[in-house]
Image: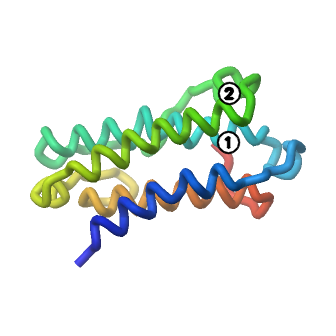
Amino acid sequence: MVDHAELVQRLEETTSLVRGLQPSLDPVDHEGWPRQVILGHIAYVDQHVWLPRLHEMAVVELPSWDWWEPAGVDWQGLYGEKAWADVVKEFAAARAETVAYLRDLPEHGWARRAHHAVFGELAVAGLCEEILTHDFDHLAQLRGHGSHAH
């Protein structure tokens, strides 16, 4: 059985990992993406994908999703001129909202499921694992260890 408290803790710990990062200022080290754009992407996806989907799972019986991340977002326009510290604060606030939602989720809420065209059927815990995978892919990118850019 999946330990929901552990999942929530791991999601919360990502904020500490982000605050402790000292990524290079050179976009070449991040596959051409400025560091604040990469972190802004993570914050935006928390606000506009993960949390809305968690809410949807609570009210829709087996929602179905065709896409995983938002298309057509001008990441550079949204985050390119922002200071790193400001984007760290935005990420921390977005993640705190996601964590608070999950902490308050009753046990029967964790049993809710959704269907994704690529990933198949997911329970709330499975969506949390996808959030963590997305986080750590991009944290690796920020550390200069490669990942996929969005």
- Residue pushed farthest bottom? 1
Picture quarter with the N terminus: bottom left
Q: Position of residue 40 (x, y in %)?
A: 62, 36
In depth, the one of 62 and 133 nearer the eye is 133
Q: Position of residue 86 (x, y in %)?
A: 66, 30
Q: Is residue 59 left or right of residue 127?
A: left
121 above or below 77?
A: below
Picture quarter with the C terminus: top right
Circle 1 — which element?
helix
The Cα–Cα distance between marks 1 and 2, rounded to whole angstroms, is 9 Å
Q: Which residue is mark 2?
A: 79
Q: Position of residue 100 (x, y in %)?
A: 32, 45
Q: Which residue is mark 1?
A: 38
46 above or below 142?
A: above
* Residue at image coords 31%, 43%: 65
Count of picture labels: 2
The image's mark for residue 145 is none
Circle 2 — which element?
helix
In depth, the one of 138 and 67 nearer the eye is 138
* Residue at image coords 40%, 62%: 9
Dot 1 or dot 2: first in sequence order is 1
Q: Amino acid at mark 2?
A: Tyr
* Residue at image coords 26%, 56%: 124
Q: Residues within 10 Å of mark 2 (few under 14, many from 20)?
A: many
Q: Amino acid at mark 1?
A: Ile
Do residues under tags 1 and 2 come within 8 Å of each other at their CB atoms?
no
* Residue at image coords 89%, 44%: 26
Q: Residues within 10 Å of mark 1 (few under 14, many from 20)?
A: many
Q: Quadrant of residue 137 in the image?
A: bottom right
